[in-house]
Image (cartoon, rainbow, N blue to C red):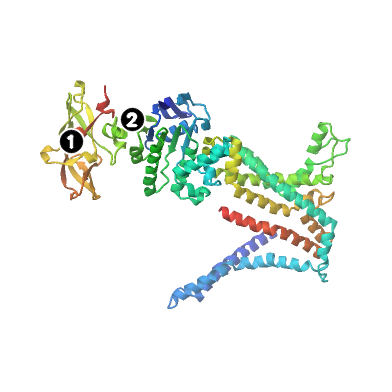
Amino acid sequence: MTSVSLKNVSKSYGTVEVLRNIDLEIEQGELIVFVGPSGCGKSTLLRMIAGLETITGGDLTIDDIRMNDTPPAQRGIAMVFQTYALYPHMTVRDNMAFGMKIAKKPKAEIDAAVANAARILQLEPYLDRLPKALSGGQRQRVAIGRAIVRDPKVFLFDEPLSNLDAALRVATRIEIAQLKESMPESTMIYVTHDQVEAMTLASRIVVLHGGDIEQVGAPLELYERPANTFVAQFIGSPAMNLLNASVVKTGASTTVRLDHGGEVTVPIASRAEDAGAKVRLGVRPEDLTLAPPEGSFLKADVEIIEALGETTVIYFKPVDTGTDPLIAKLPGIHKVAKGAGLSLAAAPEKLHLFGEDGLSYLYRD
Amino acid sequence: MEQLLGALASMAAGVGACVLYFWGGNAVLDLIFPARGPDIGPNIRRANMVRPWLFLGPALVLLTVYLIYPVFNSLVLSFYGPSAETYVGFSNYTWLLADPGFHESMRNNLLWLIVVPAAATFFGLIAATLTDNIGWGNIAKSLIFMPMAISFVGASVIWKFVYDIRSEDVDQIGLLNAIVVALGGEPQAWIALPFWNNFFLMIILIWIQTGFAMVILSAALRGIPEETVEAAVLDGANPFQIFLKIKVPQIWGTIAVVWTTITILVLKVFDIVLAMTNGQWGSQVLANYMFDWMFRGLDFGRSATIALVIMVMVVPIMIWNIREARKDA
């Protein structure tokens, strides 16, 4: 069943268009993550669903009811803010109960809802404290509790972990994952710029860039089959290496010649007219391996080595090119000297092929 | 020309003397405890113990002479007769307790105390909220703030015209009477109406102080995190509920500081009453009553006693106000 549906939704401030023709269907019980760099419009999109921003074009429906002009409180949503947005003058209990008090719900019902949320989030000892007497993590739990009390159809999370320190962020991320598991019927929309949060929490990820949806898919689908160079480089860390190349042989698999020499055959189909086309060969740093010179397609000069113990990250330049450094992430410890020459290779099925327009060869029809 | 030169010369001399004192004093201190030689450590420590007193000294002396000494002298004077020569014990105080003029002043001061801070803070809060939400808010704010720039006496002159009354056969030039007459009413001598004239005088101070309250409260309102307001919107609160249950509680500390600041001002209210009615027609207040006994009654003892009453009322509010303002910061 469709829970939230966006049809051709757009947003502009005056003449500045910040979101264009967004089409998205979110099923009930999904945890959708909007991810993208700063300014991509992900928070704006969330706030439009919440009703805190007007929708300039298109339709938003929640449970098949058009919500464009419905006041936020009547959309059946609850939102958790990055800055928690707790009412500083109210106790934890009153913070969670405020919405129901405004709605003039019976006191017994309010008490039961607050008690339930407090139990789920282990906030019982803190119910009579003011927010200022709580730690950052506890405050965020209260904010989540306030959302639970509203018993919404859709939970909206706007970068809820950004204000927490690194250790607490991991712990709270797991708490949110458990929360989702305990409420399988609830739909959740989660905005973050952190791809680790996106990969670990999402049932599906929506990658936004410059006001457009770049790709929608399950986390590993985005990792394994990115639709374009933006998604390819945004998902995964360090980012995917892109090498300029041209097609030399087309067919069920494609052979490309890299601009700096070296030929490789990729098991991705291409058309006859692709012959000679400029393409970009994508290879993830972690897919690169050391290889004997005859089996490699990349000859590299090592520039910087970061030995992390579990992995060794090598920044290198392909021999005789002036491109930005490329990155290889090799498991374990490799004693490599700066300036040394390396031969690198990758399994053909791990390679990606993008046209000059940046779109993946995989998704062409 | 000669006067001008004289003024400039004395200004230069004053500034020069200050520079000489601070710079010279500091230099002398460094000579006495030089930051070198075998005793460098103790010398620096000793110099640092003396230095604050050296710099604060002039201010402390001036405050003592012009503030602390007068307080104690007032206390002493309140036990003496009119020309401060004969000791009269508590008779100034017993006189004060029985004096109808003092009763009237106390009653009026209490009225001022209740009405003015409340009204100025209330209107200031309303003005701050409304001007933050409209396009021409900044112009409106400037207009509301402008009376702050006018002296109390100047404001009284303006309002004297508003309350002015002429005999019935000529046109009313007072704004209020002109309106009353235009609506078919009888012109009134507003500031001579016993009891009610107090409120006409209060309006002047409210008119002046609303701008002050508005500016401070507007800054406080803007300091409220926008997300708490958005969260309240999502919780279903209407604008009125957001204002009363989310915004006002968050700026409660500022409201209290504004309120008490105006309260202190009101306890000392003097210029408006002097300029408008001089305490006639039942509009006397403590500060004007004190002034009356000092310069018309020529009674040092009684005016000092009234001054002490005002001080006793102001001090606790001021202490609370300073504490609250510090807490906010």
Q: Which mark is residue A347?
A: 1
Circle 1 crowding by C-alpha within 10 Å: few under 14, some 14–19, many from 20: few
Q: Earlier in the sequence, mark 1 or mark 2?
A: 2
**In which quadrant will I find the C terminus of chain A?**
top left
Label 1 SS? loop
Give me the chain letter of mark 1: A
- Which residue has dot 2 on it? A215
Q: Quadrant of residue B295?
A: bottom right
Q: Position of residue B250 (x, y in %)?
A: 57, 46
Amino acid residing under circle 1: Ala
Give me the chain letter of mark 2: A
Q: Position of residue B146 (x, y in %)?
A: 66, 43
Camera-nearest residue between A5 and A30: A30
Camera-nearest residue between B174 and A70: A70
Camera-nearest residue between A200 and B119: A200
| Left/right of residue A271 with respect to residue B124 in the rendered view | left
Q: CA distance from mark 1 to mark 2?
A: 25 Å
| Left/right of residue B4 with respect to residue A333 in the rendered view | right
**In which quadrant will I find the N terminus of chain A?**
top left
Against B40, residue B250 (above or below) is: above
Against A289, residue A66 (above or below) is: above
Amino acid residing under circle 2: Gln
Q: Position of residue B208 (x, y in %)?
A: 70, 46
Question: Outermost residue, bottom direction?
Answer: B38
